[in-house]
Image (cartoon, rainbow, N blue to C red):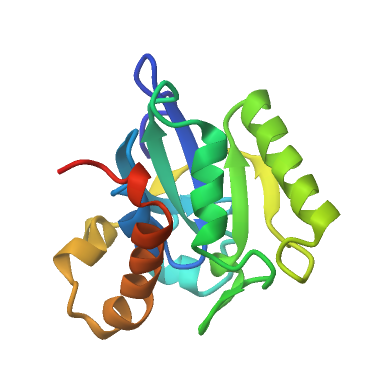
Amino acid sequence: MSPEKPAAGQEFATLAGGCFWCLEAVFAELEGVSAVVSGYAGGHAPDPDYRSVCSGETGHAEVVRLTFDPAVIGYRDILDVFFAIHDPTTPNRQGNDVGTQYRSAIYFHSPQQQAAARALLDEFAARNAFGAPVVTELAPAGVFDPAEDCHQDYFSHNPHQPYCQLVVAPKLAKFRKLFAARRKVK
C-alpha cells in the first residue's frame, strides 16, 4: 500500500490502459508529473501481486498512479495523453495483451476529476472520436497496491527486452511526437 493522500499542492491520477509498463514510460516524461508508480486497482482480492492479477481472478487492472502538480499540468491534459496512447475501444484488451487486467479505466480521486473525465467521455461519444464506442470504465479510486519492485521503472531498466521494443517503445515514440512541448526538460 502507498500513501492515500498526495503531498500538499499535488494530486493523484490513477489510470489503466493496458500494460502498466507502457503507461509508466510515457507519464514519467510528462511535465508536471513528479512520480509514477505501477500497481493494481479496481479489484476485490486483498494484497494482489502480478501473478494473481494476471490470472484475471482478482478483478484488478494494471494501473499507474501519477502524482502531479495541477499548477503545471491539468487533469484534462493528463487524460488527453492517456487517450492518445491506448485504445479505449477494446474491452479487456490492448493489442495482444488480453484479460480484464488490461482494461481501460479512469479511477478518479475527486468530484472534479470525475466531472472532467465524464465530460471528456461524453465528448468522445458525441463525435464518435474513435470510430467505435469508448469502453473506458469510470470509477472512484479505491485501494491502490503498488506492483512489485521489478515492475517499477521497467522500460528504463529493460529497454532492449522484446516486449519493450515492440510495444512500449512505439507508444513512447508516439507520445514524444504528439506531446513534444509537454515533455520534461532534462
Q: Is residue 5 above or below residue 94?
A: above
Q: Quadrant of residue 147?
A: bottom left
**Residue shown at the point (50%, 31%) measured from the top left:** 74
Please give the count of numbered marks on the rendered protein.
Answer: 0
Image location of residue 24, percent across then percent down? 35, 55
Residue nearest the observer in this picture, 167 or 123: 123
Q: Is residue 105 above or below residue 141?
A: below
Give the position of the N terminus as an image quadrant: top left
Image location of residue 155, percent across then percent down? 24, 65
Q: Is residue 73 above or below residue 138?
A: above
161 to the left or right of 35: left
Q: Residue furthest right?
A: 126
Q: Residue furthest top?
A: 8
Image location of residue 181, percent across then percent down? 35, 45
**Residue shown at the point (49%, 62%) measured from the top left:** 85
**Residue shown at the point (61%, 69%) measured from the top left:** 100
**Residue shown at the point (24%, 63%) measured from the top left:** 154
Residue nearest the observer in this picture, 179 or 52: 179
Give the position of the C terminus as an image quadrant: top left
Image location of residue 25, percent across then percent down? 31, 58
Residue nearest the observer in this picture, 101 or 178: 178
Residue 130 in view:
yes
Residue 147 in view:
no
75 to the left or right of 126: left
Residue nearest the observer in this picture, 47 or 134: 134
Q: Quadrant of residue 110?
A: top right
